[in-house]
Amino acid sequence: MDAMNCHESNKVESFCVSDPLNWGMAAETLKGSHLDEVKRMVAEYRKPVVRLGGETLTISQVAAIAGREGDVSVELSETARAGVNASSEWVMESMSKGTDSYGVTTGFGATSHRRTKQGGALQKELIRFLNAGIFGNGTESCHTLPHSATRAAMLVRINTLLQGYSGIRFEILEAITKLLNHNITPCLPLRGTVTASGDLVPLSYIAGLLTGRPNSKLSDLPVNWLWLGLYGAFETNVLAVLSEVLSAIFAEVMQGKPEFTDHLTHKLKHHPGQIEAAAIMEHILDGSSYVKEAKKLHEMDPLQKPKQDRYALRTSPQWLGPQIEVIRASTKSIEREINSVNDNPLIDVSRNKALHGGNFQGTPIGVSMDNTRLAIAAIGKLMFAQFSELVNDFYNNGLPSNLSGSRNPSLDYGFKGAEIAMASYCSELQFLANPVTNHVQSAEQHNQDVNSLGLISSRKTAEAVDILKLMSTTYLVALCQAIDLRHLEENLKSTVKKTVSHVAKKTLTTGANGELHPSRFCEKDLLKVVDREHVFAYIDDPCSATYPLMQKVRQVLVEHALNNGENEKNGSTSIFQKILAFEEELKAVLPKEVESARGGVESGNPSIPNRIRECRSYPLYKFVREELGTGLLTGEKVRSPGEDFDKVFTAMCEGKIIDPLLDCLSAWNGAPLPIC
């Protein structure tokens, strides 16, 4: 025992002296990029075994045990056995000596003035009175914690007890581990804890199962991806990276100007989250086929769109950067908490004493979850702002209103319902951003007069994560729709341009006797009209006199006629007299050519391939379109937007979005492009 005491004393001294305030350790965990950290989290999540030693448990390991039931097992470090047993033996020796020990010979909380020598009976009573939860009947109302959350709680509890300061027997930890490894999960109430002296009410049901209480039940709720804060924290980190990549894709389909990602801009702001967000977007946009094509459009007609893109695009790194910093800091705070010792009293075998304190106070969880939820709400707000621009033909640089893809826009309202749903999601998400931890109520006869509300905040954060996944799903499908519409637009514009050129050559080049006609000089300006006019503004009826194409084409011909001077008085050289022939020929040919081009795209045989294949964002598009089997949504098809949303949402909940997301960034070296 003396050797053990010496070992424990050296252990305590080492971590109390080397970094006495732990700021160094906290700073060390934030080194490197957020993306690299997410990659490590994903790799750790996929490992088949979680080895617990009390000090190195990660959020991704907790997420694996909770969400990958049956695919991953728990192993306890044998080196922890001696320390755990030493603290347990200290408690037993203390009892045998008649020492007054809180919770062993005394009452609890505000009634700790009571005394008893019946320690065993006291522990049974502790479990009994804490079994105060309400479950509901499971039909009209269910108040049971999803068993994925319960598994997470069991794992974290084992880990904190393994450090050897809690006075528990190692056999208890082995028993809980067996429950996890055999997929036996107790039924815990969803509500009824203030996360002060631990989550006493729900955790008492784990003890009830271990001790064979008659009211103990096994959880039969299916694995639920909406749970607690720990898996939510894991998912939030992934969703943060997704929001960066989606912002870059937004810039691609909106024909945005990539200078908003220039490294100097963000280096001058100094914030690492912003710098990384910009660098990730810069990487996606660097070499993008969309960006190259947009540059040509901007040079051809600088006045076609504003000099600067709107805030939702141009300031997305500045908006997302702080959220990433908050999410990272919260993640690390939670990881410190799940590796901490949270009992009271703490058994310090080396100094032969029990320390009565307040490590059970779960404030790091409550505050971290509140902060994470605020960041989630900000990410959702940016997505909604970008989505609103994307579906609005006043702002989306030529895409159709509502992202409608049909031949007849009067019978296709595209993503209008999705936009309404996005507004609903965003509203609820903004409400959930309100803090939980400022609603503390004094509990337990004013003994627990301040408490963290950590589990409540975690539940609200889990709701927020789920809503952000709904928004990310809807937005991702909309971006894929925009990509396909840009592809259709490019093929249709090329067809219109070729047809106008062909008709101009046929009707404007020569006169009645084969002589060269002054109207032949109109062709160049006619093609400029096609280049500058948004295709979807006229393509459903390309030769309509009320649509801009025919109006602008006629305007070109009229202007040339007005400049034709004395030649207009001669029937053989008059441009005015050529206008009708040109328009009639165009009306005869163009609709057929447009339909042929559209049919080619629909059949998978377009004359121009989809630009997305040449972009770093392609893996996400390919995943949504090819692996999940979604497609261009139109009013001509029976399939509704919600059917495609469900496919993507399910895949996102199952973690299948992670690999294609990381594939988009596989070539990034972790640094911005050089300033030159």
Image: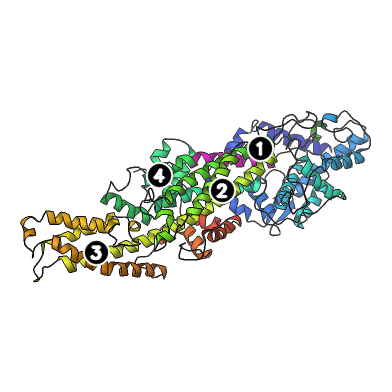
**Vertical side of 84 occupied by 589: above or below:** below
Residue 670 x %, y %? 47, 47
Numbered tag placed on residue 366 in the rendering: 1
Foreground of the two, 577 or 463: 577
Identify the amino acid type marked 4: Thr
Q: Is residue 504 visible?
A: no
Extent of the magenta region? 320-345
Foreground of the two, 514 or 256: 514
Q: Main secondary structure of the magenta part?
A: helix
- Badge 2 is on which residue? 468
- Disc with the residue nearer the chain's start (3 vs 4): 4
**Vertical side of 516 occupied by 391: above or below:** above
Residue 366 x %, y %? 66, 37
Q: Secondary structure at mark 1?
A: helix
Q: Nearer the viewer, mark 2 or mark 1?
A: 2
In three-dimensional space, the C-alpha distance between marks 2 and 3, rounded to whole angstroms, equals 46 Å
- Badge 3 is on which residue? 500
Side of 294 where 3 appears, left or right: right
Q: Secondary structure at mark 4?
A: helix
